[in-house]
C-alpha cells in the first residue's frame, strides 16, 4: 500500500512544481514586470514562449559542446528561463558577461563564448522597448541558451582544461578528471552565479606565474608556449599529496617534492623521440606487415603510479621489440655476443645452455621463438638498481651502465624507460632507514654507512670470493618505507625561483596541443 502511494505522490509533486511555471504570470513575468515597471510581462505566455525556446535551442545546439546536457536540464525544468529569472535583475548575468570578456587573461578568445551576442542581448532586454510581450520571447530564449552554454564552457575550461589530453596523445595514461553531466546540471542549477565564477579561477602558484608572464609577454611564440602550459596546469591530475616524485620529460629531470621543498633532484635520460613521419610510416607498416617498415617509437609514456619496490642487481627481461630490432642482429653478427653480454636465451621457457650455437639464419626476426634475459651484474643495461611501479607499458626507473648519457643536452636516448643519474641516493630516500639502506648497499658491494653493519658486508664479500662454491649474483628486493607517488609528465614552461623556465618540445607535443586548442583562440 505504501509502495503504491509513493508512486502516486511523485508525479503529483512534479506536477505541482511544474504548475509554478504554467500559472499566470509565471515567475519570469513577475520578475521582469517588477524590474522594468512594465505590465506587458504580466501577459507572459509560457506555452508560446516554450515553442520559441525549443526552436531556438535546436538552432543553436549544433555549436554547443554539451548540447545533450543543456537540453536535459531545460527539459527537466519545463523550459523555464532559470538563469534570467534568477540572475538578470541582480546583475549576475552582467557579471558573467564581464568574466567572458576578460577570459583573454586565460588565453581564450572571448568570442568562443559568443560574448558580444550575449552582451547585445542583455542590452536589448535592458532597453525595455518591446511593444508586446511576445516580442521579448526570442531575446529571452536566445539569451538564456547562449548564457547557459557560455557559463558551462567557461567553468569547464578553467576547472578541467579545454582539451582531454588522453584524446590527442597516444601515450598519455594519466587519468585526468573531466566534466560530467551531473556536475554540469548542478552548475546550471546554481543559486549564485558570481560565487561560482570566482571559485573557478585557477589558484595554483604555477598557473598564476605562467598567467602573469603570458599577460606581460610580447612575442607570439612566447605567449603560445605559456598558453599551452597554462592549459596543462588546468588539467585535473590525480591527487598526489605533498610528497611525490615528478619526472618532467622536456626538462630531463627527476624531482622529489615535499610540499614546496625539493628533497632530491637529478638528471634523467628518457625515451627517444619517435621517427619523423611516424604516422605515415605506421600506415605503411600496417599494410605490409614487414618489420623493416615498422617505425621506431621509444617515447616515454606519461603516467601516474606509485613506486612500490626496489630491485638491486636487476635482471633485464628484454622486450620483444628490442630483441627483434637489436639483439637479433647483434647475435647474427657476433656468435659470442649473447654470452659475452650475460644474455640468457629461453625457448618455450627453458634455458638454452649454449646460445652461441643457435643458427640464427633459421629464424626470421618477426617470428623469433626465443625470450632473452640479461643477468645481474656490471654489464647489465639496467645498472645496479631498478625502481618498480605498476603500469601497463613495462616502464620503470633504473640505473645505467652508460653514464655518459647524462652529459648530453638532449637526453631523449633510451628505449622508453627512465634512467636516473643518482640511483643510490634515490634508493636511500625511498627505504628511509639506515638498516635497510645498508642491506641494499651490501647487495651491490658497497660498505655500510653504520659501522655496526660491517659484519654483513664482510660476510657477503667472503661468499663472493669463495671459489670453492659457485656464487651466483641474483636480484634482491627491497620495499620503500611507504609507496611514493610518481608522475611522469610534460611541461615546456613552468615557474622556478620566481623565473619562468623554458625547455625544448622534445616530443613535439606542443604542436598537437596547439592544434587541439584552436577552437578557443
Image: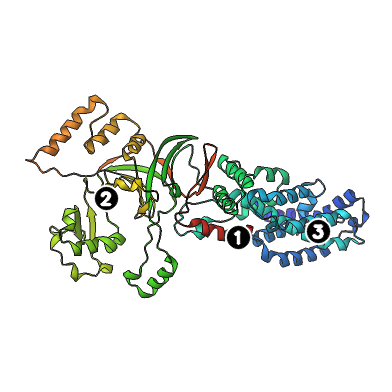
The part of the image, by quadrant, that contains residue 24 is: bottom right
Image quarter hosting the C terminus: bottom right
Q: Is residue 19 visible?
A: no
The residue lying at 67 percent from left, 66 percent from top is: 62
Expressed as whole percent of the image width and height from the top left, the position of residue 140 reads 81, 58
Q: What numbered label is drawn on residue 236?
A: none
Expressed as whole percent of the image width and height from the top left, the position of residue 471 reads 13, 42
Question: In the visual, does 272 lie left or right of 348?
Answer: right
Question: In the visual, does 47 lie left or right of 101?
Answer: right
Q: Earlier in the sequence, mark 2 or mark 1?
A: 2
Q: Is residue 433 visible?
A: yes
Q: Are marks 3 and 1 in contact (CB under 8 Å)?
A: no
Q: Are marks 2 and 3 in contact (CB under 8 Å)?
A: no
Q: Are marks 2 and 1 in contact (CB under 8 Å)?
A: no
Q: Is residue 109 above or below residue 248?
A: below
Q: Residues within 10 Å of mark 1 (few under 14, many from 20)?
A: few
* Residue situated furthest left in the rendering: 468
* Residue situated furthest front in the rendering: 219
Question: Distance between the Cα atoms at labels 2 and 3?
Answer: 69 Å
The part of the image, by quadrant, that contains residue 55 is: bottom right
Question: How is the rendered protein coloured?
Answer: rainbow
Q: What numbered label is drawn on residue 518?
A: 1
Q: Give the residue pinned by disc 2.
A: 381
Q: What numbered label is drawn on residue 140?
A: 3
Q: Is residue 45 above or below residue 407?
A: below
Question: Distance between the Cα atoms at labels 3 and 1?
Answer: 30 Å
Question: In the visual, does 328 lie left or right of 391?
Answer: left
Provide the secondary structure element on which disc 1 rests: helix
Q: Earlier in the sequence, mark 2 or mark 3?
A: 3
Provide the secondary structure element on which disc 3 rests: helix
Amino acid at each position: 500500500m505504501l509502495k503504491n502511494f509513493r508512486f502516486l505522490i511523485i508525479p503529483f509533486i512534479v506536477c505541482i512544481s511544474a504548475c509554478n511555471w504554467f500559472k499566470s504570470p509565471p515567475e519570469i513575468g513577475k520578475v521582469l514586470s517588477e524590474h522594468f515597471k512594465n505590465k506587458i510581462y504580466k501577459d507572459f505566455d509560457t506555452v508560446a514562449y516554450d515553442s520559441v525556446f525549443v526552436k531556438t535551442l535546436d538552432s543553436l545546439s549544433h555549436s554547443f559542446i554539451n548540447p545533450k546536457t543543456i537540453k536535459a536540464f531545460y527539459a527537466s525544468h519545463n523550459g523555464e528561463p532559470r538563469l534570467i529569472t534568477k540572475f538578470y535583475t541582480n546583475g549576475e548575468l552582467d557579471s558573467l558577461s564581464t568574466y567572458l570578456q576578460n577570459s583573454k587573461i586565460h588565453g581564450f578568445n572571448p568570442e568562443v563564448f559568443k560574448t558580444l551576442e550575449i552582451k547585445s542581448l542583455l542590452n536589448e532586454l535592458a532597453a525595455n522597448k518591446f511593444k508586446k510581450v511576445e516580442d521579448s520571447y526570442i531575446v529571452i530564449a536566445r539569451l538564456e541558451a547562449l548564457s547557459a552554454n557560455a557559463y558551462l564552457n567557461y567553468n569547464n575550461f578553467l576547472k578541467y582544461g579545454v582539451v582531454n589530453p588522453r584524446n590527442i596523445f597516444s601515450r598519455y595514461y594519466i587519468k585526468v578528471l573531466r566534466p560530467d553531466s551531473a556536475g554540469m546540471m548542478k552548475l546550471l542549477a546554481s543559486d549564485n552565479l558570481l560565487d561560482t565564477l570566482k571559485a573557478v579561477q585557477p589558484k595554483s602558484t604555477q598557473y598564476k606565474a605562467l598567467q602573469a608572464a603570458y599577460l606581460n609577454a610580447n612575442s607570439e611564440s612566447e605567449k603560445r608556449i605559456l598558453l599551452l602550459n597554462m592549459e596543462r596546469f588546468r588539467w585535473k591530475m590525480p591527487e598526489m599529496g605533498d610528497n611525490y616524485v615528478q619526472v618532467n620529460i622536456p626538462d630531463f629531470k627527476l624531482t622529489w617534492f615535499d610540499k614546496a621543498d625539493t628533497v632530491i633532484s637529478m638528471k634523467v635520460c628518457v625515451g627517444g623521440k619517435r621517427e619523423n613521419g611516424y604516422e605515415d610510416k605506421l600506415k605503411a607498416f600496417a599494410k605490409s606487415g614487414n618489420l623493416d617498415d615498422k617505425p621506431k617509437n621509444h617515447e616515454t609514456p606519461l603516467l601516474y603510479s606509485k613506486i612500490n619496490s626496489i630491485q638491486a642487481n636487476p635482471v633485464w627481461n628484454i622486450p620483444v621489440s628490442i630483441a627483434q630490432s637489436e639483439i637479433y642482429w647483434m647475435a647474427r653478427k657476433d656468435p659470442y655476443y649473447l654470452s659475452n653480454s650475460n644474455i640468457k636465451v629461453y625457448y618455450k621457457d627453458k634455458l638454452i645452455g649454449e646460445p652461441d650455437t643457435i643458427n640464427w639464419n633459421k629464424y626470421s626476426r618477426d617470428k623469433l621463438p626465443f625470450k632473452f634475459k640479461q643477468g645481474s651484474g656490471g654489464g647489465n643495461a639496467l645498472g645496479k638498481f631498478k625502481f618498480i611501479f605498476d603500469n601497463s607499458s613495462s616502464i620503470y626507473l633504473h640505473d645505467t651502465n652508460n653514464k655518459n648519457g647524462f652529459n648530453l643536452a638532449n637526453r631523449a636516448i633510451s628505449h622508453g624507460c627512465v634512467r636516473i643519474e643518482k640511483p643510490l641516493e634515490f634508493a636511500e630516500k625511498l627505504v628511509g632507514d639506515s638498516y635497510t639502506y645498508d642491506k641494499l648497499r651490501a647487495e651491490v658491494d658497497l660498505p655500510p654507512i653504520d659501522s655496526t653493519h660491517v659484519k654483513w658486508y664482510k660476510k657477503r664479500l667472503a661468499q663472493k670470493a669463495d671459489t670453492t662454491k659457485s656464487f651466483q649474483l641474483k636480484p634482491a628486493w627491497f620495499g620503500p618505507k611507504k609507496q611514493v607517488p610518481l608522475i611522469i609528465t610534460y611541461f615546456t614552461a613552468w615557474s622556478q625561483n620566481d623565473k619562468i623556465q623554458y625547455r625544448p618540445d622534445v616530443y613535439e607535443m606542443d604542436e598537437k596541443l596547439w592544434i587541439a586548442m584552436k577552437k578557443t583562440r
